[in-house]
């Protein structure tokens, strides 16, 4: 574990150097936060609260948390170094390292995402807290909910990276990564609840999506914080999170081992 912990630390510190990019990201995420919140608020003003599956306060908290921790859950932030190394065949040189390549890439990806979130989440949350009710970020419904939110947030990030690793494995079978990553990006954004919270989906689609691994990324932690997911439904959702994390890591690691055995570089 020491090589992977060292890589995680080095990559995390290295990614913290991009402060200008983080500042630009904060401004962008605050702007999108306003857009999403005000669009939802307009719909709520014109309708009745009983017509919507979530309270406006819960939707606002969900939105600001989604923007604050976007770096952990963004479906379009693939590691270009990994993709390029697979495409060019330079991954062969990485196989010379006495480490497990799956764990190596997983630690690297997690550190990069965590560093991005560390630089950006406080300013975005500060803006959300300063806004008036019901469009601002509300306090967590309880201390227990906050603790579970933090736990599920990190588990959700692990599920996200585990699915990204499946995408990287798929790229070994393609000439270009553009098609695979584009399809994956759309799936991540739609089925995770990043664009619209899953409770707003039609009932049948919501039930299907809630069982998919995508729901573990944003749907579970943010709804727990807002109090929209509690009791038996919350316990079931956390259990699914853990199931998908373990399952995807096991499948991804086995698959990665197989594709690396058959990888070719420059015809050899």
Image (tube, grey):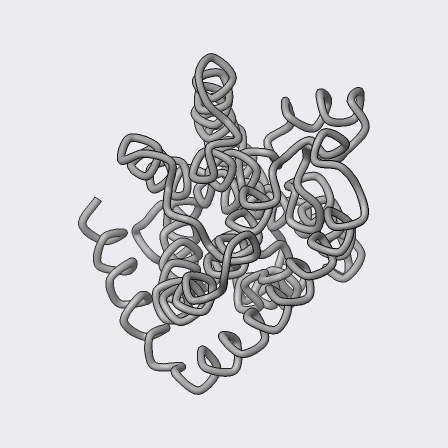
Side of 66 where 212 appears, left or right: right
Relative height, residue 13 to residue 219 (above, below): below
Task: Looking at this view, name the residue that lies furthest to the top.
Answer: 232
Across the whole image, how many numbered discs are drawn on residues? Answer: 0
Q: Position of residue 106 (x, y in %)?
A: 42, 49
Side of 151 where 83 appears, left or right: right
Between 257 and 220, the residue placed more toward the observer is 220
Q: Position of residue 109 (x, y in %)?
A: 44, 56
Q: Is residue 190 visible?
A: yes
Between 181 and 196, the residue placed more toward the observer is 196
**Which quadrant is the N terminus positioned in?**
top left
Between 49 and 166, the residue placed more toward the observer is 49
> Residue at 77% of width from left, 59% of height from top?
175
> Residue at 31% of width from left, 66% of height from top?
12
Relative height, residue 89 to residue 254 (above, below): below
Between 5 and 74, the residue placed more toward the observer is 74
Relative height, residue 60 to residue 254 (above, below): below
Q: Position of residue 236 (x, y in %)?
A: 49, 16
> Residue at 60% of width from left, 41% of height from top?
166
Task: Looking at this view, name the residue that lies furthest to the bottom.
Answer: 20
**Which quadrant is the C terminus positioned in?**
bottom right
Q: Position of residue 214 (x, y in %)?
A: 62, 36
> Residue at 45% of width from left, 82% of height from top?
23
Side of 155 where 218 appears, left or right: right
């Amino acid at each position: 574990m020491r090589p992977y912990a060292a890589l995680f630390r080095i990559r995390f510190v290295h990614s913290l150097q991009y402060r200008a990019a983080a500042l630009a990201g904060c401004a962008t995420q605050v702007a999108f936060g306003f857009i999403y919140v005000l669009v939802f608020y307009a719909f709520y003003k014109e309708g009745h609260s009983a017509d919507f599956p979530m309270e406006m306060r819960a939707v606002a908290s969900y939105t600001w948390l989604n923007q604050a921790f976007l770096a952990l859950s963004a479906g379009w932030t693939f590691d270009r170094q990994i993709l390029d190394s697979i495409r060019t065949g330079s991954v062969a040189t990485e196989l010379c390292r006495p480490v497990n390549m799956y764990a190596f890439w997983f630690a690297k990806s997690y550190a990069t995402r965590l560093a991005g979130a560390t630089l950006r989440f406080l300013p975005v949350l500060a803006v959300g807290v300063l806004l008036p009710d019901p469009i601002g970020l509300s306090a967590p419904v309880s201390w227990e909910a906050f603790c579970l939110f933090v736990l599920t947030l990190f588990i959700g990030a692990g599920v996200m990276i585990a699915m990204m690793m499946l995408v990287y494995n798929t790229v070994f079978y393609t000439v270009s990564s553009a098609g695979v990553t584009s399809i994956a990006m759309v799936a991540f954004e739609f089925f995770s609840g990043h664009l619209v919270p899953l409770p707003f989906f039609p009932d049948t689609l919501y039930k299907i999506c809630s069982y998919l691994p995508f729901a573990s990324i944003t749907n579970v932690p943010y709804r727990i914080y807002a109090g929209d997911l509690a009791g038996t439904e919350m316990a079931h959702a956390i259990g699914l999170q853990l199931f998908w994390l373990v399952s995807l890591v096991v499948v991804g690691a086995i698959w990665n081992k197989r594709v690396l055995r058959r990888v070719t570089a420059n015809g050899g």
